[in-house]
């Protein structure tokens, strides 16, 4: 089983959580799809490279940016402390057990971790370049396993199937944005006398370097208990690889109006694939006792089984395989009054919907940002501050899943970045 344990370990270590941010400020605001400018546009919306804010440097360099975090979909620290405490003396009532089980989603207890990092990215006028590494993944523990721990095992069917996967990808991204149309006037009920000063389009082309991949392609484990005995059945298969390469293409559109509105839209991974070619392997295992239930003890039952004949465990190399990056869509609407800004983000990212509403207040060089959003069936609370000296910029942000305090959170995420302008 060593090969199987190795595959599962890789899957857990690649373990996705959705991160709104690529820096502290974008994490705190809930997204930069409409308002990103300069080097931030390389990662958020290449169409915004066509726009220059007043006082913005022609050349910007981001020394680094980082977002990282981990969490789960069910339990906070306070909930764990409520039911488990210090772990020395645990007593759960029947109601406690029901409450704990109800906290776990049908897909099980999902743990996730994610990180994004970029170094030495830059933008000059309409052009941009960036290098970003993204590591993400998730792993689920089946709900029925907790049901068995909390309650007695009865005569019914249990599903212990697992799911998970993840990978690491480095993107070397070249971006360009250009103005498409000037001064479009719309006379609509909600947009009377609105002039779209500029409408821009942008494209990013990325060389993708895969730096580790693992995915459970089959994770079925079933157990049926009846008067006739027990009938287990399991089938596991995972693909792993260490290196790969591919290509990614993103398209963006953006605009701003005469009455302070900013609009952005991004289609990410319109083309996005990685061909995994090094150390590509498949690990598989199975347990199949047929269709006749067996008793645990007794003549001719489980004790007499030759387990080598009903189990298998294998690992073999394959020539390589391709994976498709998930198609992501984001759109945003912001109103920028200078000192104050309101921002709304909506998207479908990493095969899950997300939404966020936030704002920013400027006190000279000190900016304060905050937002709330919803993703992975949990509310997300975000806050950040930024120091903007025009030629030097630093930010730091934090995001909490579900709860506003450390005790109530189901996941905690941090983001920060430093950039310069000339």
Image: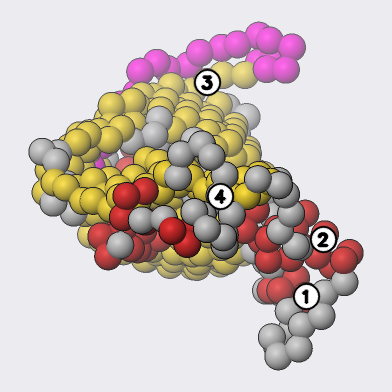
- Identify which residue is drawn at 77% across, 54% down: 102
Mark 1 or mark 4: whose residue is earlier in sequence = 1
| Percent of width and height locating residue 35 | 49, 41
Q: Which residue is mark 3?
A: 196
Q: Does 67 sit left or right of 146 as displayed?
A: left
Disc 1 + disc 4, Cβ < 8 Å: no
| Percent of width and height locating residue 379 | 69, 51
Q: Secondary structure at mark 2?
A: helix
Q: Does 190 sit left or right of 6 as displayed?
A: right
Q: Secondary structure at mark 3?
A: strand
Q: Which contiguous range is marked in magenta?
A: 171-193
Residue 95 placement: quadrant: bottom right
Mark 3 or mark 4: whose residue is earlier in sequence = 3
Q: Nearer the viewer, residue 258 or 372?
A: 372
Q: Using the image, tell me which numbered label, if any, was put on residue 83.
A: 1
Mark 2 or mark 4: whose residue is earlier in sequence = 2
Magenta stretch encompasses residue 187: yes
Q: Using the image, tell me which numbered label, if any, was put on residue 294.
A: 4
Distance in Å between CA atoms under marks 2 and 4: 34 Å
Note whether residue 181 is visible. yes
Disc 1 + disc 2, Cβ < 8 Å: yes
Distance in Å between CA atoms under marks 1 and 3: 56 Å
Mark 2 or mark 3: whose residue is earlier in sequence = 2
Q: Which residue is mark 2?
A: 99
Discs 3/4, front: 4
- Identify which residue is drawn at 75% across, 62% down: 152
Quarter containing the C terminus: bottom left
Color encoding of the figure: secondary structure
Discs 1/4, front: 4
Distance in Å between CA atoms under marks 1 and 2: 10 Å
Discs 1/3, front: 1
Q: Secondary structure at mark 4?
A: loop
């Amino acid at each position: 089983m060593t090969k199987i344990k190795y595959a599962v370990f890789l899957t857990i270590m690649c373990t996705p959580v959705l991160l709104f941010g690529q820096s502290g400020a974008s994490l705190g605001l809930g997204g930069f799809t409409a308002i990103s400018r300069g080097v931030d546009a390389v990662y958020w919306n290449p169409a915004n490279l066509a726009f220059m804010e007043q006082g913005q440097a022609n050349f910007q360099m981001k020394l680094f940016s980082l977002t990282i975090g981990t969490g789960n979909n069910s339990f906070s620290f306070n909930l764990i402390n409520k039911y488990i405490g210090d772990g020395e003396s645990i007593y759960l009532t029947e109601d406690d057990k029901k409450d704990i089980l109800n906290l776990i989603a049908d897909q099980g207890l999902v743990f996730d971790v994610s990180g994004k990092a970029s170094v030495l990215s830059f933008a000059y006028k309409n052009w941009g370049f960036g290098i970003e590494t993204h590591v993400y993944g998730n792993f689920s523990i089946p709900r029925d396993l907790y049901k068995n721990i909390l309650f007695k095992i009865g005569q019914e069917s249990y599903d212990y199937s697992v799911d998970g996967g993840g990978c690491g990808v480095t993107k070397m991204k070249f971006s360009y944005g250009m103005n498409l149309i000037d001064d479009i006037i719309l006379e609509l009920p909600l947009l009377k006398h609105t002039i779209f000063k500029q409408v821009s389009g942008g494209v990013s082309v990325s060389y993708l370097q895969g730096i580790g991949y693992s995915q459970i392609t089959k994770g079925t484990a079933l157990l049926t208990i009846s008067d006739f005995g027990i009938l287990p059945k399991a089938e596991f298969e995972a693909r792993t690889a260490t290196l790969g390469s591919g290509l990614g293409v993103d398209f963006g559109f953006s605009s701003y109006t005469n009455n302070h509105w900013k609009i952005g839209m991004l289609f990410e991974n319109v083309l996005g694939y990685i061909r995994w070619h090094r150390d590509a392997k498949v690990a598989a295992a199975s347990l199949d006792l047929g269709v006749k239930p067996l008793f645990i003890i007794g003549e001719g039952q489980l004790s007499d089984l030759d387990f080598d004949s009903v189990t298998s465990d294998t690992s073999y190399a394959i020539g390589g395989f391709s994976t498709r990056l998930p198609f992501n869509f984001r759109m945003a609407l912001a109103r920028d009054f200078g000192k104050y800004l309101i921002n709304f983000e909506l998207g479908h990212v990493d095969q899950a919907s997300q939404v966020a509403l936030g704002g920013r207040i400027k006190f000279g060089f000190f900016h304060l940002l905050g937002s709330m959003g919803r993703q992975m069936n949990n509310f997300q609370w975000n806050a950040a501050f930024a120091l903007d000296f025009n030629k030097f910029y630093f930010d730091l942000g934090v995001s909490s899943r579900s709860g506003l305090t450390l005790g109530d959170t189901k996941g905690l995420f941090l983001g920060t970045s430093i950039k310069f302008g000339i």
